Amino acid sequence: MAGMTHEAVERLKAHMAPIVDLYAAGSVLSWDQQTHMPPGGGRARAEQLATLRRLSHEMFTAPRTRELLEAAEADTARLDPDSDEAALIRMTRRDYDRATKLPAEFVAERTRAQATSVEVWRRARPANDFALFHPHLEQMVGFARRTADYLGYEDHPYDALLDLFEPQMTSREVTALFAELRERTVPLVRAIGERREVVDAAFLTHEYEEAKQEAFARAVVERFGYDFSRGGLARAPHPFATGFSRDDVRITTRFDRRYLPSAVFAIFHEAGHAMYGQGSSPTLERTSLAGGAGLGVHESQSRMWENLVGRSRPFWQHYFPRLREVFPEQLADVDAETFYRAVNRVSPSLIRVEADEVTYNLHIILRYELERALLEGTLAARDLPEAWNARMQEFLGVVPPTDADGVMQDIHWSAGQIGYFPTYTLGNVMSAQLFEAARRAHPALMDEIGRGEFGTLLGWLREQVHVHGRKFFPQDLLERATGSRLTSEPYLRYLWQKYGEIYGVAPERTAVTGRA
Amino acid sequence: MAGMTHEAVERLKAHMAPIVDLYAAGSVLSWDQQTHMPPGGGRARAEQLATLRRLSHEMFTAPRTRELLEAAEADTARLDPDSDEAALIRMTRRDYDRATKLPAEFVAERTRAQATSVEVWRRARPANDFALFHPHLEQMVGFARRTADYLGYEDHPYDALLDLFEPQMTSREVTALFAELRERTVPLVRAIGERREVVDAAFLTHEYEEAKQEAFARAVVERFGYDFSRGGLARAPHPFATGFSRDDVRITTRFDRRYLPSAVFAIFHEAGHAMYGQGSSPTLERTSLAGGAGLGVHESQSRMWENLVGRSRPFWQHYFPRLREVFPEQLADVDAETFYRAVNRVSPSLIRVEADEVTYNLHIILRYELERALLEGTLAARDLPEAWNARMQEFLGVVPPTDADGVMQDIHWSAGQIGYFPTYTLGNVMSAQLFEAARRAHPALMDEIGRGEFGTLLGWLREQVHVHGRKFFPQDLLERATGSRLTSEPYLRYLWQKYGEIYGVAPERTAVTGRA
């Protein structure tokens, strides 16, 4: 920015600002829909959101955008490639090409089919009726294939879809990464299982008053650095974070009075997302560069605060005494170490969102393999349950008794979101890679966390990740921050060290060194 | 609607629907701004709202609207003038002419000056610094005059401004109505003052727990018929009602733990507004006819539920025992009659929003007279305090010790809202006129209210007022519902009967009969 004015870029920015405003307005309406809107409001809200989306799409795909973009691109040579301006041009080009590749009628048709499919899923899941759902799922796969065809890809249609959520990541890279994760996680799961250790966690299911859960978790995330004067916490059926500007990034959660970790870790998690948004550079406001580099990097922030910080031993050494002051009766017979082990209990389970850190990625890898097979046509939607259950047995040694707890557990596929799941695991992997780099830069980091101090970590993340918003592609950002592109080593190291220690498992036998 | 399709009208409706969506989206953003938005969110929110307003204005004032409107107007002869279609054409024409009369640059300039003026008022009021504020007020008067000039008027510039808030009402009518109200209210205020009655109301300032206030008032307005499945109650610094469709009309309030009536009557009041919105015909959805006929009719609904119902003796005969169950200690020594008298205490006071039913309109009449003088140029903004205080002495016998509690007490003028105040009193007058008509149609109405039953009243209002949305002009609507155009008789009758009885004042000496 400093000094020179690039008129063409300024004109592009001025053109884009109201489009960004419309997206933000849509996000406010969605937030309201999930937090405060009464049941009756749904019908009109759908129209209002559709209008906002249609208008912003029309304004963005108008010829005027292309003209301004081309004029700005002609100027690019004069710009520092790391500047906000160069990034704005780069990302606007990327977005513009994507937005103009999908015909409006196709998008409209897909949107309608998705709405129906989600609706059917909502009925089919509680009824455990996969036969009702699979024709819609088949349709969603068809739309995903056509979307990939419109967007174009070199190697595999999956690449085109994945790129929507994780820019520039390829299916080839994901396959390699996931193969390694799977190879080196399954033995850890087995070794832990063989220990047959009984972890005392019954106290987590005592009665925990909601208001007190909230007060505790709010105080923690405020210490993390989540700024409530530029945020807020509301109740919603499913926890999420959303932002309308860097100075208004909100989180939501649900509370379970009979399971303490549910809301507490959800609040840590969502605050991780929200701090990313709050740390975005003010110079990126009202541009499409405000926001995260991709879903993987976003998830790395939420998982880091939830798990690498929030489920660490130093963290609970500091915070357990405070938690016990809030819930003296429920935690009367518990100490910090017992609590630490309870919230890190490893146990193969059926439901992804309830999975522990060790088994979580196996749920994702399973979905990824099935998504690819569906896209390739080597697996039909109707045959999914069998393929699902076989992999559950193979990866985790458990088989869902019903499809409701199996192949129909997630909303994503019903909404046509194919290519999305890998970003959860990419986020886990990135979280450890970034955390390791932060610890290299600040060797006393864990000691600070053990004193309830998080400023050094947040400061490092702000500088290395948050401030850049969406300026850089995920792996470029990782490389700037950590010195290397995506690697599973730090995450596998983290898992084996932490859980090996908790469960008394021998060091990894097949560990490959010197990779990262 | 039934049967025949009028293609031209349908095309106009389809064109208008997304414009209505944008207005609704803006209302959601405003609601959020006043209820849940963190302090940091203000800057971006202003941009988002400005973008939504600009886009909807551009879409509405585009040549396409005029073309579709003219095509639809060519069809008007074939339509029943009472049909939704005819009303849509009528009101769209009205809105279009207004929207296109004000040059965009003028509106932009006015909006900026208003923002500054409100800002200065916010500082000047607590500092009691009228000298700081009056140049901005003078500017606002200038903008109001120019607005009137752009919009055009026959008789008085005030007409053009009043018409924005109270369609088709003229300043001549208001002047006549207000003269009568003033003439016949001041004697009542004097007579009550002369009684020197000491009303026991100290118990209203005990400590009343917020959550219990809320639960009580919610239960009442739910009985009124406010549908929470299509609404909701949130906290805001100033109570208001707002709607995003007939199926999502929300209310807000603030709570004062040390003054019970504050939130309770605010909730009754806002629920009155909200039930109007909820009762709008479904056929008017996504048209500019959803909403109220004008601010006066809107205020008639809120004041009716707040005062004619909510401050009536039958109401408290039913509800006081329930309220005492909620606050047994605070109300231990109070009975229903004492409570009724306390919440109807008449006492000339300085602040409009705290005024009782009898003196309230005098506050409005005072403002109306000053507004006209400002517009005519016979009064300069700098001389307002003197004119204000002289009228306060004349009307109410009290003089504000400071301008903060005098001429600077309301936000309206600082925001350039000249022509707005009369609608409060018009609402009061209409509320009594409508209520009398409802009682004529249902003689047992007050008995039902005394049993906590409100279905007959709400049903009558739905049918006579709510269902029509904005289809008819206020006085046409009144005439359909009550058999006559606006008249002050029912309201004056109501005031003299109710307060004459409470204070033991002799019947009105100058009563004119046979008017309405």
Image (tube, coloured by chain):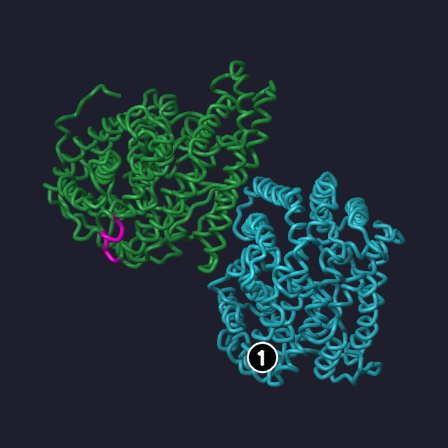
Chain colours: A cyan, B green
Residue A360 belongs to magenta span: no
Task: Identify the residue shown where x is 51% and y is 68%.
Answer: A218
Task: Identify the residue shown where x is 73% and y is 48%.
Answer: A124
Task: Identify the residue shown where x is 25% and y is 36%.
Answer: B368
Q: Nearer the viewer, residue A63 or B319?
A: A63
Disc 1 residue crowd, few under 14, some 14–19, many 20+, Cα 10 Å: many
Q: Is residue B443 visible?
A: no
Left or right of residue A493, residue B254 in this image: left
> Residue A110, position in %: x, y?
73, 43
The kind of secondary structure the magenta stretch mainly shows is: helix
Task: Read off the magenta span.
Answer: B127-134
> Residue B171, position in %: x, y?
28, 28
Task: Identify the residue shown where x is 38% and y is 33%.
Answer: B164
Q: Quadrant of residue A341?
A: bottom right
Q: Is residue B101 visible?
A: yes
> Residue B381, position in %: x, y?
23, 43
Residue most toward the right?
A: A378
Left or right of residue A438, residue B296 in this image: left
Q: Nearer the viewer, residue A333 or A157?
A: A157
Q: Indicate the quadrant containing the N terminus of chain A: top left, top right, bottom left or bottom right.
A: bottom right
> Residue A353, position in %: x, y?
69, 63
Q: Quadrant of residue A409?
A: bottom right
Q: Amino acid at mark 1?
A: Trp
- Asked if residue A129 is positioned above or below residue B63 in the image, the reply reads below
Residue B133 belongs to magenta span: yes
- Asked if residue A377 is positioned above or below residue A253 in the image, the reply reads above
Q: Indicate the quadrant containing the C terminus of chain A: top left, top right, bottom left or bottom right.
A: bottom right
- Asked if residue B358 is positioned above or below residue B481 in the image, the reply reads below
**Chain letter for the residue marked with disc 1 in the picture:** A
Residue at which label 1 appears = A316
